[in-house]
Amino acid sequence: MANNNTVRRAGSVAVGAEIDAGLRAHMSKVYGLMAVAMAVTGAVAYAFGTSEALFSILFNVNTGSMNALGWIVMFAPLGMVLFMGAAVNRLSHAGAQLFFYAFAALMGMSMSWIFMVYTDVSIAKTFFVTAISFASLSLYGYTTKKDISAWGSFLIMGVIGLIVAMIVNIFLQSAALDFAVSALGVLIFAGLTAYDTQKIKTMYLQARGQGGGGISASSMGRRRMNVNVNNSGDMDTEEVTGKLAIFGALTLYLDFINLFMFLLRFMGSRE
């Protein structure tokens, strides 16, 4: 007859296997949602960037400057991220997913100018390099046994420094500063890809372990969000992990987009 220790060990193995399977399914959902969002962004960016009629809605074709709607579209994604941070606890799973895809479409519109500035071949090459780099870095974040959570504060400070440097360079127009910003941007978002992947993994494990307690969702646009679930069962664990998959996908999506844009400044061949 099996003793109590044997039973406990068997139970622990079964629970561990269930959590591992759930984690793999969760990460697959995260990457799947991200892939769909990337496809939406790419399709919208290509449609607006290669059609003079659509491009003229956002930009003045003759001068290349943005019109009023173009400025709105440029800053709308930031506003959507801030809104999602405030409304995360009120959005349903389906509502959050729809919001994510709308965000991806707006990002595509705001990025459409790259098809007017860079050659299609260089854009495709940069995307391919970004995809390989992103996959490698995300795999590292998922598989490493090392706790890299300490990277977070340094990387967030780096993002803030990048934004400040980019604003300053609007006035200075320094080629050296522009090169430094691009190089640091690649390094910072490479680090964030690994960091955010591990964070998504950790938050899923916390959510499954708490089974309905309060959990902290992923940073989106480098803004922290909280998904609060009370103990009365207003939102079950599956609902929480479903939202976390969407927020995780958005976080990695932002890492990918920024890594791509900074690499494009190095690898892009202008028209």
Image (cartoon, rainbow, N blue to C red):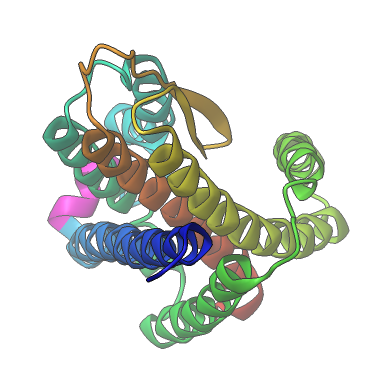
| Image position of 37 (left or right of 113) | left
Residue at image position (12%, 36%) is 94
Camera-side residue of 45 and 222: 222
Residue at 18% in and 34% down: 93
Looking at the rendering, the stretch of residues picked out in magenta corresponds to 53-58
Main SS category, magenta section = helix
Q: How many marks?
A: 0
Pick the residue in front: 267 or 138: 138
Q: Nearer the viewer, residue 8 or 14?
A: 8
Q: Position of residue 85 (x, y in %)?
A: 41, 22
Residue 57 lies in the magenta stretch = yes
Residue 91 showing in the rendered view: yes
Residue occupying the point 23% across, 48% down = 105
The image quadrant that residue 100 belongs to is: top left
Q: Residue furthest front?
A: 1
Place of residue 228 in the rendered image (x, y in percent of width and height, measured from the top left): 39, 18
Counting from the top left corner in percent of width and height, residue 257 is at 47, 58
Q: Name the residue: 37% across, 71% down.
A: 1
Q: Is residue 127 left or right of residue 258?
A: left
Q: Nearer the viewer, residue 46 or 105?
A: 105
Does 219 appear above or below 104?
A: above
Q: Is residue 1 above or below residue 247?
A: below
Residue 115 vertical position relative to residue 73 in the rendered view, above or below: below
Residue 221 counted in the magenta span: no
